[in-house]
Image (cartoon, coloured by chain):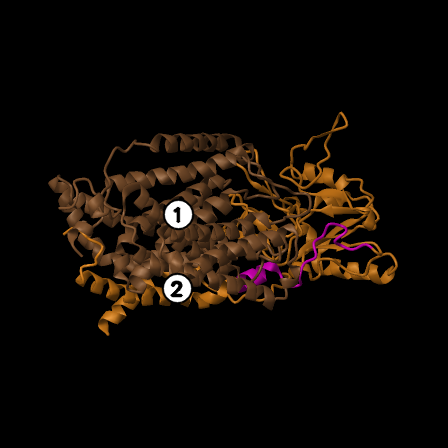
Amino acid sequence: MSAHELPRPIGGRLLASPMPLLTAVFGLSAAVIVYRLFAGIGAVSNMTDGFTWGIWEPVNVVVFTGIGTGALAVALLTYLFNRGEYHGLVRPTVLLGAICYSLGGASIMVALGRYWNALLLPVIPYWNLGSALLEVAVCVLAYIMVLWVEVLPAVLDGAAASASPVWSSIGRRWGRRLAWAMPYVIALAIVLPLMHQSSLGGLMLLAESKVHPLWHTALLPLLFLVSCLSMGYGAVVVLVTVLQLEWSARADLALFDRISRVNAVVLLGYVVLRLGDLAGSGKLRLLGLDGFSLLFYLELALFVAPGVLLLRPATRASLGRTFGAALLAVAGGALYRVDTYLSVYRPAPGWSYFPSLGELAVTIGMAALGVAIFIVVCRLFPVVTVRDEARPGGPP
Amino acid sequence: MRILRRDLLKGAAATAATALAGEARAREKVEPEPGAVGMLFDSTRCVGCRACQTACKVANKLPPDPVTAAGGVYDAPVDLNSRTKTIIKMAGPDAGHAFVKQQCMHCVDPSCVSACMMKALHKEGHGARRLEGEQAGTGVVVYDRGTCTGCRYCQIACPFNVPKFEWFEAFPVVVKCELCRHRVVPGATGPAAFANPACCEVCPRQAVIFGWRRDLVDEARRRLAAEPGRYNGHVYGLTEGGGTQVLYLAGAGVSFEALGLPRLPERSAAQFSESVSHAPYLYGATPVLLYAALALVIRRNKARQDAAGQGEGEAR
């Protein structure tokens, strides 16, 4: 591969649209967060002792990190299955993952009542090794650090290409060292998400009397693991397509083809697991026409539809259709996760919940912050591989 | 071979922490501790006077919980909350409007303890830190605000919805019954040396009594045998959810569900959850071996890709 296909900084004005909008939206959520620090979580949310996690855990943590596993999905293809042609997707997806996971972590800090005690998490003698949430917390914190280490090559490349001799030499020297260490970092970046994504499902095992039996199963960890992969592969296609539309990034149908076929297998594999589990445990008789059943059908349809679509060569031959199917795959995984944590969670009769404006502001503001960080990093550092003919200055 | 060994060593070292997190413990059924203390609530004796509720507020220095209704203000909470550690509720007509007391059940194998990241909720004497006056063996579920992050996973986990959170505090804590561990009688022998619930002390009908769990089990069975027509024939808490240290009796023809007590399987949710979660980890070996294998394969693949010019594009 020649040098001109390497990723490049996008450049351009940092505060160009949609930056002002994103900043304003995040500003609103920051105001809510500050108010929460003084008045308590109840003052900004509709959370109660019954619905104690509201939407922050189900959406900001469980869905955001599900999208963030695009990094895992690409790492598996590129390094484990030795598909070097996916290198161009490594940097954007790793940046996406680093941002999604960091925002998930930041949201948790907002949601924690006694957030200052989170500083004690590294104190190993305090650990309750039976706690699924401890596993998630420790693994996610470690993975956030690993993801940002994975982002570093782009930053060091940027430094190496800098006009300043000092930065340039730092970038070259540390770039080489990091390149040597990378395999060990990447291996960690595969093990950690496999562990905590399954534990995110494992979290709800304890709530067996509260989660609807159509969702509560010993397979929760496995289903969450599989759904993070379907979301991850979907998120990669969605991200790269958006980058192509916005910045003329390289979005190769040939590259998407394998991702799409892999995702079809993952999506349909999930469907087989889910239905097989229900059949095996005799829960199929619970299906009817009630609200829970309808939610289940919708959820399953969001796995079956992209799975079947992506199997068809006609879908994979079209960028638009591939993009649509990938969006469905992300939506299916997201719905499954929100359902398990919230929609089919019933603490006891009498409790009800709908998110407050403050909760929505924090959720949306965190997403806006994520988009803003992504844009800034891509403008400054070589993350995205831009099509030659579209690059300012044209082909050499 | 030397390279392989070096990689394996590195892999083992780098994942020590993650392996620890996934360490599997043999997860067998938890039996009541030998010195388990608890309460027995007999709903056929309770007349709903709520003396226990008031005594609990005084003993635990809980603020009032004013409720406005019909133009008046009453200290009459409608549910357990961060200011109310025990409450008397009236069951529906299918339970003959019997009264039922709610508070922490002090489960034998509590979900909240399994859930808690840093053992803020723990069986007395088995926490991350030793709180003042803690005595191991009582099985009382106590709370250490010093290691609580306020994550509220305990609230998700508890099948009885007992732990409550201070929603409108900047520095909130989790609130629940700790069996008046702080009210032990100095110099007492027997269970009063370990806990002394104010609610049991004031109950005019001895509808709720305190003692060793094993004695309470015997007493409950004695009552069932003495007046079989009075009760529904079962003791709630013997086996429910792995067993609880607070036991319940209900009147003839009254189901425990009608009293608001959930129907739970015999094995605890904690046992189920930890068994399922830990199984794939094989005592922590899985993550270590997986990491080592991945590191080897990735290093080989990456070297080949770099040689083929497909590399990540390091500064060159």
Q: Mark 2 points at which residue?
A: B287
Residue A274 location (% of width, % of height): 54, 62
Residue stretch rendered in magenta on the structure: B254-276
Indicate the amino acid at tag 2. Answer: Pro
Colour assignment, chain B: orange
Q: Mark 1 points at which residue?
A: A101
Q: Residue A113: within the magenta?
A: no
Colour assignment, chain A: brown
Residue B227 location (% of width, % of height): 87, 59
Left-right relation of B31 to A165: right
Q: Residue at x 62, y 54 (%)?
A: A293
Q: Which residue lies furthest to the left in this view?
A: A165
Q: In this view, does A181 lie above or below A11?
A: below
Q: Which chain carries label 1?
A: A
In-front residue for pair B55/A63: A63
Residue A77 found in image quarter? bottom left
User: Label 1 vs label 2: CA separation?
Assistant: 21 Å
Q: How crowded is mark 1: few (under 14 residues within 10 Å), some or many (20 or more)?
A: many
Residue A234 location (% of width, % of height): 40, 53
Residue B159 location (% of width, % of height): 64, 52
Secondary structure at badge 1 equals helix
Residue B114 visible in the picture: no
Q: Is residue A298 above or below residue B149?
A: below
Q: Residue at x 57, y 67 (%)?
A: B28
Q: Which residue is drawn at 48% across and 34% down?
A: A361
Q: Residues within 10 Å of mark 2 (few under 14, many from 20)?
A: many
